Amino acid sequence: MKENLKEKLMSRKFWIAVATAVFIVLSDGLGLNMDKDIYWKLVILAISYIFGESAVDIARVKALPQWELPTNIKKLQKAIETARQEIKAIKKFLKTKGTNIETHSEW
């Protein structure tokens, strides 16, 4: 948890978001009368940068080989596979009891 917080505080996306929030507060809260065209261009630029970097991060993780995935993603994938196996077992059990599971929309 502590490493995750340190990693987030070192993030450029985080600091861009903080700087943009400070810019918005200073511009609107203090009434600096900044040109609205420049104001919105800077805000949109910051948001675009954050979304763009997020897309790059997602693509980078998707491109990793299976053995290089972070541990928490591996755990999540294992939990999903376990849940799928449990659902199959439940379906099999219900079929043996004569329950028509095809009529249940959540299955």
Image (spheres, rainbow, N blue to C red):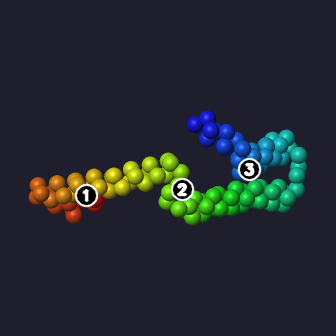
Give the residue type that dot 1 points to.
Answer: Lys
Q: Is residue 4 above or below residue 38?
A: above
Q: Nearer the viewer, residue 74 or 103?
A: 74
User: Does 57 appear above or below 12?
Assistant: below
Describe residue 52's horizontal placement relative to residue 84 as left or right: right
Left or right of 48? Residue 99 is left
Q: Residues within 10 Å of mark 2 (few under 14, many from 20)?
A: few
Quarter placement of the N terminus: top right
Element on which disc 1 rests: helix
Q: CA distance from mark 3 to mark 1?
A: 44 Å
In the rendered structure, which amino acid carries the disc numbered 2? Glu
Disc with the residue nearer the chain's start (2 vs 1): 2
- Label 3 or label 1, whichever comes before in sequence order: 3
In the picture, measured across the screen, residue 100 lies left or right of residue 39, that is: left
Q: Residue at x 80, y 60 (%)?
A: 41
Can you name the residue that lies furthest to the top here?
2
The residue positioned 28% from the left and 59% from the top of the image is 107
* Circle 3: residue type: Arg
Which of the labelled discs sits on residue 88, or is there none? 1
Q: Residue 23 appears at what percent x and percent y?
A: 81, 47
Residue 75 shows in this picture:
yes
The image position of residue 38, as x and y in percent, is: 85, 58
Q: Which residue is mark 3?
A: 12
